[in-house]
Every structure is written in structure tokens, then in C-alpha cells.
Image (spheres, rainbow, N blue to C red):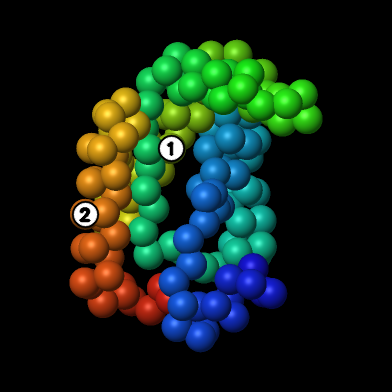
Amino acid sequence: MRETILPALRAGQWVLCDRFADATLAYQGFGRGLDAAFIGALNAFSACSLVPDLTLLFDLPVEAGLARARRRAAGMGPETAEDRFEQEDSEFHRRVRAGYLTLAAAEPARFRIIDGAADVETVHAEVGRCLAALIAAPPEGGRRAP
């Protein structure tokens, strides 16, 4: 955060993250049942209280997501086999998905839910629309880096 993300934001650069603080809350808080307030405090500290301007949530039914992850892992070498999350049972993944959807419902101005079950072209077009809208709009309330 302090070595890469904040300097880039201060320089006026765009920063894209594959995952950020929401992932910790979804997986550890909703998925594993750890204290959400504690995770929030840790996230605020480690992320320097920075909140993304936009979060794209690629939503997919649990079974479809796990099947994709397993196919991906099967096509890779043993060093990239399923990680510990893919080894969790379906109920864990249902809690994580519900957690993400709860987070999205709580912050609709930040989240965009994209149908991950759609074909690649449709998903690509939706991502493009979301990014174009972000680029065209001024940042809200100074959420960019201090």
C-alpha cells in the first residue's frame, strides 16, 4: 500500500487491484465467521483507510465458480493446484458469495455487480461500460489518495 498504491495514486495514476479489503471481509468475516469489526479495523489500518472508487463484483453461482477454479487448477502444474479456498466446502463459498452481495448492497454507489455466468464478450462489454463511467465521473468526496 505505502510502497506502490499510494505513490501511484498521488502521481495521478490509475490503480487496479485483483482483490482488496472486501475480499478479506468476505472470506474471513462472512466465510469463516471471524469478527467483522476487527477485520474492518485491520483493513482500515493496512489499507490506510483508502476505499476504492469502484469495485467490480463478478457474481457467479457457487457450483459454477468452483467448477471453473478446478478446471483452471487441473490445467496447471502441481505447484498451482487448488488453493485452500477452493478446497473449502460449498457452504463456505455460499457464505462468501452472500457476504460479497451484502457488501455490494451496503455500498451501491461503489459496487457494480457483473453476471459472471455471461459469455466473455458480454462480461467484457459490461466491464468497459463500468470503467468508462468511472473515468467520466469526478471522484466522490476525495476517495482518491491523500
* Residue 94 in view in this figure: no
What residue is rendered at 66% in x and 56% in y?
42
* For residue 54, above or below residue 71: below
> What residue would you read off at disc 1?
100
Q: Is residue 86 left or right of residue 30?
A: right
Residue 111 seen in render: yes
Q: Quadrant of residue 64?
A: top left
| Residue 27 percent coordinates (x, y) | 58, 35
What residue is at 65 percent from the left and 49 percent from the top? 38
Question: Residue 101: percent from the left, percent from the top?
Answer: 37, 36
Q: Which residue is mark 2?
A: 129
Which residue is pictured at 78% across the width and 30% down the height?
79
Relative side of 20 to 143, left or right: right
Quadrant for residue 109, please give it: bottom left
Residue 25 sits above or below residue 109 on the image:
above
Disc 1 to disc 2, C-alpha distance: 21 Å
x then y, percent, for residue 31? 57, 29
Amino acid type at mark 2: Arg
The kind of secondary structure element at disc 1 is helix
**Do callouts 1 and 2 mark residues in contact (Cβ within 8 Å)?**
no
**Local SS, label 2:** helix
Residue 17 drawn at (x, y percent): 52, 56
Within 10 Å of disc 2 (Cα), the crowding (few <14, some 14-19, many 20+) is few
Mark 1: which amino acid?
A: Tyr
Q: Nearer the viewer, mark 1 or mark 2?
A: 2
